[in-house]
């Protein structure tokens, strides 16, 4: 029987993907679908300035050489038995990051995760196993994964206010810790909040916990966005003095890895024993069993090809562009601001016409754009021009909108109590 291919559905050829969703139809014009996806991504990339993925690094060498095989670093990252896959590279990434953060060499453990959320889960699970009665404190500006994880662990969360700039309100933390001082405290500090890139002060957090003499603590830093930049500055350290127990960073943000991934680091002495799994011959110490070895290779490559100095340069370029953006917007009469260390520029939400073209992140009347490495002056200039064209002198002028409100509250779950 000869098989006569039916013509490519017009909608797939012309750009619609509706037909592609129906795999019951054969044959599917696979090439047309893939071409369409790639073309669409190419079209939106220049106006996509609201999301925190760096776009300056070239990962094609790894994708070309390794991308067609399975690399599965199943089980514990320190396991040296079994198939090697990319464990060596994963270990190198863990060591590089832990060294950059000045984590003590004798007391560190970590692995390459699927992203910031898994890192937070792994760290908070570890903390909760050791301190099962602890209250988990997190601010209203914390990432939405935190209340979800608190619920998954069956733990008790305590919500703490954040200031308008996104940083934790330490007075409110003190009030909440005082109220729950009989229980151990797990505190989630954020280094780079989603909306404003605010950084919580872990020294201040420890002072509050000391003052109330909580019976046991674990301070975790969710540094998905800003962990690597702040570590390269020396502003974020996990040395003994810091008393930080664990940290999460993301791999597809500052390092722009083309698959979601991240790294979690935990002080090894705070971990409890994991179960030995007979048939994989490894320790079950990670959240997922099978783990993406390609992500480890991509992270390793991004680090190896630039080194600390190269990445420091990327950080400073991005910050310069963010400062330039604030200047340009302010000059144009649009009152933008940023934290001094941040790539994120916060601004009153532009009119719909501007947002239809430029992909910002918007939370009611506040929006942000992020000058991640790879974003250019040309993109910023074009955005500012569109904004001035759309608003004109006096039209919808943001000064009339009043003050920039505080960041959106995270879902509360079993929050305030
Ligand atoms: C991006 C981000 C996360 C979540 O990371 P995923 O990789 O999406 O799971 C968590 N916390 C913060 C502060 C983030 O910026």
Image (cartoon, grey):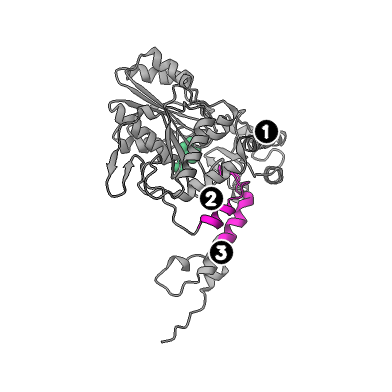
Q: Quadrant of residue 206?
A: top left
The first of marks 3 and 1 along the sequence is 3
Residue at x 51% of width, y 78% of height = 7
Task: Residue 61: say if magenta.
Answer: yes
Q: Which of these two is toward me, 238 or 258?
A: 238
The first of marks 1 and 2 along the sequence is 2
Image quadrant in which the N terminus is located: bottom left
Q: Which residue is mark 1?
A: 323
For residue 233, say whether it is visible: yes
Ligand 1 is within 8 Å of the C-beta of the residue at disc 2: no
The secondary structure type at the circle numbered 3 is: helix
Residue at x 40% of width, y 12% of height = 211
Q: Quadrant of residue 404?
A: top right
In the picture, the disc for residue 258 is 2
Between disc 2 and disc 3, the foreground one is: 2
Q: Which residue is mark 3?
A: 36
Task: Residue 70: say if magenta.
Answer: no
> Is the Cβ of the residue at disc 3 closer than 8 Å to that at disc 1?
no
Cα separation between marks 3 and 1: 36 Å
* Residue count near mark 2 (Cα–Cα under 10 Å), binned few <14, some 14–19, many ≥20: many
Ligand 1 is within 8 Å of the C-beta of the residue at disc 3: no
Cα separation between marks 2 and 3: 18 Å
Q: Which of these two is toward me, 377 or 359?
A: 377
Residue at x 52% of width, y 35% of height = 96
- The image shows residue 412 at horizontal and vertical percentages of 37, 33
Stretch of the chain drawn in magenta: 38-67
């Amino acid at each position: 029987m000869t098989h006569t291919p039916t013509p490519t559905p017009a909608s797939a050829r012309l750009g619609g993907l509706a037909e592609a969703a129906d795999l019951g139809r054969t044959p599917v014009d696979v090439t047309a679908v893939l071409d369409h996806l790639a073309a669409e991504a190419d079209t939106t990339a220049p106006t996509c300035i609201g999301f925190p993925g760096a776009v300056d690094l070239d990962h094609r060498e790894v994708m070309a050489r390794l991308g067609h095989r399975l690399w599965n670093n199943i089980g514990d990252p320190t396991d040296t038995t079994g198939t090697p896959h990319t464990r060596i590279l994963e270990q190198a990434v863990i060591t590089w990051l832990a060294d950059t953060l000045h984590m003590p060499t004798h007391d560190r453990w970590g692995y390459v995760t699927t992203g910031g959320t898994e890192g937070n889960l792994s760290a908070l699970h570890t903390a909760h196993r050791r301190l099962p009665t602890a209250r988990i404190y997190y601010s209203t500006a914390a990432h939405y994964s935190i209340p979800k994880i608190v619920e998954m662990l069956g733990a008790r969360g305590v919500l703490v206010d954040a200031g308008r700039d996104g940083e934790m309100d330490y007075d409110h933390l003190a009030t909440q810790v005082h109220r729950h001082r009989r229980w151990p405290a797990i505190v989630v500090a954020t280094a780079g909040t989603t909306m404003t890139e605010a950084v919580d002060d872990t020294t201040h957090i420890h002072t509050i916990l000391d003052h109330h003499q909580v019976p046991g603590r674990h301070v975790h830093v969710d540094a998905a966005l800003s962990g690597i930049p702040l570590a390269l500055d020396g502003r974020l350290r996990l040395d003994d003095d810091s008393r930080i127990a664990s940290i999460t960073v993301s791999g597809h943000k500052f390092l722009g890895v083309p698959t979601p991934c991240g790294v979690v680091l935990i002080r090894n002495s705070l971990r409890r024993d994991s179960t030995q799994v007979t048939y994989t011959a490894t320790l079950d110490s990670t959240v997922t069993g099978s783990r993406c070895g390609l992500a480890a290779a991509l992270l390793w490559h991004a680090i190896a090809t630039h080194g600390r100095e190269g990445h420091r340069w990327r950080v400073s370029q991005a910050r310069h562009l963010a400062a330039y953006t604030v200047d340009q917007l302010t000059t144009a009469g649009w009152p933008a601001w940023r934290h001094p260390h941040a790539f994120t520029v916060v601004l009153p939400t532009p009119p719909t016409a501007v947002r239809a073209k430029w992909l910002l992140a918007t939370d009611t009347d506040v929006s942000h754009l992020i000058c991640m490495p790879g974003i250019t002056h040309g993109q910023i200039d074009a955005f500012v021009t569109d904004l001035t064209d759309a608003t004109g002198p006096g039209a919808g002028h943001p000064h009339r909108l009043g003050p920039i409100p505080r960041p959106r509250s995270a879902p509360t779950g079993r929050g305030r109590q």
